[in-house]
Image (spheres, rainbow, N blue to C red):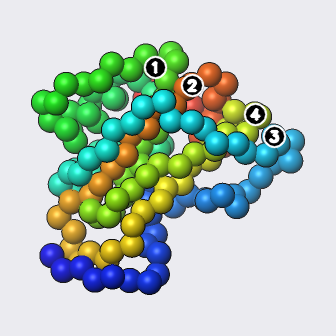
């Protein structure tokens, strides 16, 4: 694998879809967005072949989906207990071994906007990718990117 520094920012995928950043479309009725605090988080690196395991929705909302994702990317490591009545797991999955961080904001209507930040090394044919699982309080959250939150 070769890599070289690049001045251009790499595009980051948050679970398979390009997402807006801080200047995202804002609904005047919903009000401005404010930061959505992370309650707890987990980061890691996995084989690139496992990248499709990241949910296209950008989140995990059920114990079954959480168990499946955790086992796929972290193997036999003990599964953290999550109360999905009160928590939602945001999943950011990069395209390569660059560090990745999930970023999120919520408006008064409970719509969550997701994006991610990443480091800027270029990788030809990456063998792995990095991911970030971020637990957030589910209270008041109704949608992610305008799509209602559904149980997985």
Q: Which residue is mark 3?
A: 30
Tell me the CA gap for discs 4 and 3.
Answer: 5 Å
Q: What element does badge 1 sit on?
A: loop
Are circles 1 and 2 on residues that touch, CB within 8 Å? Answer: yes
Q: Is residue 42 left or right of residue 39?
A: left
Residue identified by numbered label 1: 84
Q: Earlier in the sequence, mark 4 or mark 3?
A: 3
Disc on the earlier residue, 4 or 2: 4
State the CA–CA distance, disc 4 to disc 1. 20 Å
N-terminal-most mark, 3 or 1: 3
Q: Which one is earlier in the sequence, the residue at label 1 or at label 2?
A: 1
x and y percentages locating residue 40 in the rendered image: 42, 31
Look at 50% across and 15% down and name the residue there: 85
Give me the C-alpha separation between circle 3 and circle 1: 25 Å
Residue at the spot of label 4 = 109
| Residue extending farthest left | 76
Q: Are marks 4 and 3 in contact (CB under 8 Å)?
A: yes
Q: Is residue 140 left or right of residue 118?
A: right
The quarter of the picture where the N terminus appears is bottom left
Question: Where is mark 2, residue-wise?
Answer: 138
User: Which label sits on residue 112?
Assistant: none
Residue 107 pos. (x, y %)? 73, 39
């Amino acid at each position: 694998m070769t890599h070289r520094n690049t001045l251009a920012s790499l595009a980051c995928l948050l679970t398979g879809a390009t997402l807006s950043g801080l200047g995202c479309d804002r609904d005047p009725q919903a009000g401005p967005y404010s930061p959505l605090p992370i309650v707890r988080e987990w980061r890691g690196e996995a084989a690139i072949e496992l990248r499709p395991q990241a949910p296209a929705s950008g989140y995990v909302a059920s114990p079954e989906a959480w168990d499946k994702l955790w086992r796929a990317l972290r193997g036999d490591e003990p599964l953290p207990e999550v109360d999905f009545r009160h928590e939602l797991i945001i999943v950011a999955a990069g395209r390569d071994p660059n560090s990745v961080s999930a970023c999120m904001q919520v408006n008064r209507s409970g719509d969550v906007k997701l994006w991610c930040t990443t480091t800027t090394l270029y990788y030809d044919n990456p063998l792995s990718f990095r991911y970030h699982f971020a637990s957030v309080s589910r209270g008041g959250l109704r949608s992610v990117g305008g799509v209602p939150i559904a149980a997985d």
